[in-house]
Image: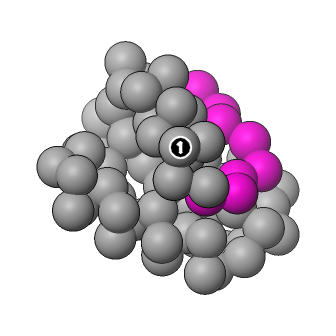
Amino acid sequence: MRKKERKAVITFQNTTSAMAMEKLCKEQGLNGRLIPVPRCITAGCGLAFSANPQARFELENFMKESHIIYDKIYDIEI
């Protein structure tokens, strides 16, 4: 069984926003990836962006600057 790690999980209202987040992060060299929304979270979109929790504020500022609309940022173990 894989050991759970603490992650910042960002949820979105739609798939378009989730995919835009992944694309722009790759272009800017920001770490993270799309994952299925964990069962413990309810979201409008089935995809979420997972990243290191220390990058939470950097990613939040990046989304504001890039006009990416997100629902919520969770700090959970997955």
Q: Residue furthest left?
A: 29
Q: Quadrant of residue 64?
A: top right
Magenta region includes residue 71 = yes
Colour mapping used in the image: one colour
Residue plotted at (61% across, 71% down):
17
Which kind of residue does numbered mark 1 sit on? Glu
Residue 36 in view here: no
**Callout 1 crowding tier (Cα within 10 Å): few <14, some 14–19, many ≥20:** few
| Image x and y of residue 27, in percent | 21, 62
Q: Is residue 36 above or below residue 3?
A: below
Magenta region includes residue 52 = no
Q: Residue furthest bottom?
A: 16
Which residue in the structure is indicated by mark 1?
65
| Image x and y of residue 58, in percent | 42, 27
Q: Is residue 25 left or right of residue 45?
A: left
Q: Is residue 68 left or right of residue 28?
A: right
Helix, strand or loop for disc 1: helix
**Closest to the observer, 44 or 21:** 21
| Image x and y of residue 77, in percent | 50, 31
Q: Is residue 13 above or below residue 38?
A: below
Q: Is residue 25 above or below residue 44?
A: above
Residue plotted at (51% across, 53% down):
66
Question: Magenta residues?
Answer: 68-78
